[in-house]
Image: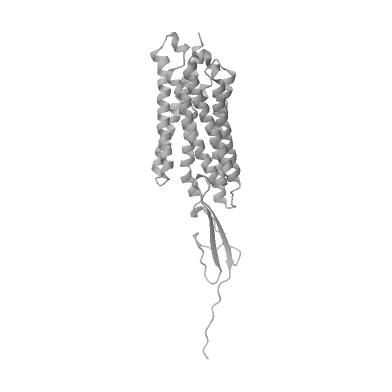
Amino acid sequence: MPNVELLFGPFLLGTFINMILYGVLTVQVYHYYLTFKKDAPWIRYLVFYLFMAETVNTGCDIAMMYQPLIQKFGQPDAVKFFPTMFAAEPVVIVAISTPIQIFFAWRIKLLTKSNILACIIVIFSIVSCGGGIWTTIRLVQVKLFSRKPELHTAALVWFLAAVVADVLITSVLVFSLSRRKTGFVATDDAISKIIRMTVQTGFITAFFAVGDVVFFMTLPHTALNFLWDLALSKLYSNCLLSTLNARSGLQEMTGYQSQQRNVVSSGGRRPEGMMDGPAHNLGSAMYELETRTFDHSDVEYGITITKVVETRQDPTPRVRETTQ
């Protein structure tokens, strides 16, 4: 008889983590719909779809644990066969991760203007989706815990393709955003924050996928890999929602109030009492400043980078009319 602790312990802990992350996701979805009411309809529909899919995923995980621990408690079949609802796990995970990876591929296309990079990420994402569907089919066919190693090929296609897609998304975003720095402190701070968030979120999903593969391959007769597996879908959704929700704070960092206007007076210092604003109109004793702005609205996370170029212009001399 298999070790029940190594068999159902990881299943149960993975389900607990999944449910905790579902609570976090619920708060994030509520905050998103409350804050970003003017987002494109398709993005709002994507968030709704992901929340519904995650709800189904959580329900499947609860049913998956209820069957062996309650319905079939003490019966030999409980430790002999995979739970019936476990077969739904891979296909539901890829139904969540694939749209998210494609969404980030679209953002990369906007950011880099490169169709090739976006297509490569989409290809790996679709391969991962196919691997997840294949794993579900093999689970229905295999059924027995003792035949778990027979799932290795399908699972490797699923996880390795997902890892490559996640690493590509993180690497391309970090590289592209690093090149977007403007020299303005507020904007550069916002970009640095985006880069840190990108690395953290991309690293988490890739780390859990790699952990799943390693435990799956090295410990084939235990269920320890499901500690990683059951949390994967919630990590993808929470990463996307945290990315969308972070825009409000980042936009404040790059607003007019946080931009510095380096206006130099004729004495080499900023005049006292001068207020920041969209234009600078100084008296005739000083000089006038002409302000030009260059906007890049295709930046990741919805942040618009504005470069402000100020040029010095001598005041127009007044011509006195004299009567003779």
Question: Can residue 265 be seen in the rendering of this structure?
Answer: no
Colouring scheme, one of rainbow, by chain, secondary structure, one colour: one colour
Whole-percent x, y for residue 156 in the image: 57, 25
Whole-percent x, y for residue 96 in the image: 46, 32
The mark total stands at 0
Q: Nearer the viewer, residue 253 or 36?
A: 36
Q: Nearer the viewer, residue 45 or 137?
A: 137
Q: Is residue 313 left or right of residue 248?
A: right
Indicate whether 321 appears above or below 156.
below
Whole-percent x, y for residue 294 in the image: 54, 57
- Residue drawn where x is 59% and y is 66% of the image: 312
Question: Can residue 145 be seen in the rendering of this structure?
Answer: yes
Indicate whether 47 appears above or below 180.
above
Q: Nearer the viewer, residue 250 or 71?
A: 71
- Residue drawn where x is 41% and y is 41% of the image: 44
Quarter of the image holding residue 85? top left
Residue lying at the far bottom in this picture: please name it: 324
Q: Nearer the viewer, residue 290 or 304?
A: 304
- Residue drawn where x is 48% and y is 37% of the image: 240
- Residue drawn where x is 59% and y is 23% of the image: 214
Whole-percent x, y for residue 303 in the image: 50, 48
Indicate whether 26 appears above or below 278.
above
